[in-house]
Image (cartoon, helix red, strand yellow):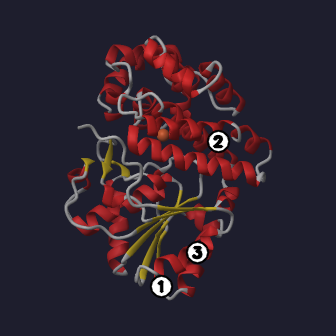
Amino acid sequence: MSELFTLIPNTLVLHGAGVLEQLGTEVASWKCRRALIVTDPGIVAGGHVDKARDSLEAAGVAVGIYSEVRENPDTDDVAACVRAARGIEADVLIGLGGGSSMDTAKGANFILTNGGRMENYWGVDKAEKPMLPFVAIPTTAGTGSECQSFALIANAETHMKMACGDKKAAARLALLDPILTLTQPESVTILTGIDAISHAVETAVTKKRTDVSFECSKESFDLLDSSFERVLEDPDDMEARSKMQLGAAIAGVAIENSMLGAAHACANPLTAKFGTPHGQAVGVMLPHVVAANSEDDAVANAYSDFYEGDLESRLAGLLENSGLETRLRDLGIAESDLPDLAEEAAKQWTASFNPVTADTRFLEALYRAAW
Ligand SMILES: [Fe+2]
């Protein structure tokens, strides 16, 4: 018997302008009394943390704040967040921010409730004990972490990203409030938007895809593709912001069920070795991944069902119009770096889900095409 689909096991998703105000009553209804908000200084400055705290306190929930989240969180960040949660004896964790805030909170939840080290949870369903309720409140339209059970945490020494997934780690509540995305710097809107688009595209064709996950990928791409350029033209277009946020979350559901592919496998070493932002790294690879995967007829057919038109040029166009770099050579990467990058990319878990076997040779060819 094969598993048909799980979608998201445990997450109530509320979507709409102003839903952040419901945070306190929802959390109080679970009998939680002490919340730790996990966030970064930019989100504090944007005023969102105050709003979340007011809502919680009005419902009788005490609030602690951990605001030291960094991009691409590692095991040291998780340890610091765990100390903050223990300090207030938190009985609920709230990830408020981009994927890094949500991942840091999720990672801390493993250690707080199940002990040990992050490495113990690398993979799927390794936690044995129940975990604390977790609320995901994204302020970007990007990772879709709010609809996934995975925490992406880098090893602080090796920088290798560990995907630690467990159904118990999925958010109990995800609040998608498009008002929160209005304060992002334009560069963040661009990078997270391209990332979300890449999630829709990569999940559509992976080896693990199902009919249901494919529909999520397609719905998500329709929402993102029709609103990304609108948001860049008019950052205050709430309808487009709202569609971006929903599209990113639905792409998260697709990832939960079908994983990712070669563009993400290639992106991780670019981020680890050269500090290339994730959205830039995945965006520069994606059109070439679509071209290479399309050599396989079955995958080419899946892309045609996914998008009417020339997907590769549409993706290249979105990248170019967003102002991101379109070639690896313009990102400070030398041609001589490509073989080592391909070795690293082949070790990435996501490579194993690409519909066409992504061995070192295949991945090096992708890097050369993108160079
Ligand atoms: Fe991504």
Residue 135 in the image: x percent, y percent? 46, 66
Circle 1 is placed at which residue position? 61
Residue 186 as seen in the image, left or right of residue 50: right
- Can you tell which mark lies on residue 22? 3
In three-dimensional space, the C-alpha distance between marks 1 and 3, rounded to whole angstroms, equals 13 Å
The residue at the point 31 percent across, 23 percent down is: 343
Which residue, as the protein is rendered here, is positioned at the far front? Answer: 1
Q: In the image, what residue type sits under mark 3?
A: Gln
Q: Are marks 1 and 3 in contact (CB under 8 Å)?
A: no
Disc 2, SS? helix
Residue 165 seen in render? yes
Looking at the image, tell me whether mark 3 or mark 2 is earlier in sequence order: 3
> Label 1: few (<14), some or many (≥20) within 10 Å?
many
Circle 2 is placed at which residue position? 223
Q: In the image, what residue type sits under mark 1?
A: Val
Q: Is residue 170 above or below residue 186?
A: below
Residue 93 as seen in the image, left or right of residue 97: left
> Label 3: few (<14), some or many (≥20) within 10 Å?
some
In three-dimensional space, the C-alpha distance between marks 3 and 2, rounded to whole angstroms, equals 25 Å
Residue 272 in the image: x percent, y percent? 40, 37
Residue 147 in the image: x percent, y percent? 46, 53
Res 97 quadrant in image? bottom right
Seen from the viewer's position, the closer of residues 130 and 232 is: 130
The residue at the point 39 percent across, 30 percent down is: 265
Disc 3, SS? helix
The residue at the point 59 percent across, 81 percent down is: 54
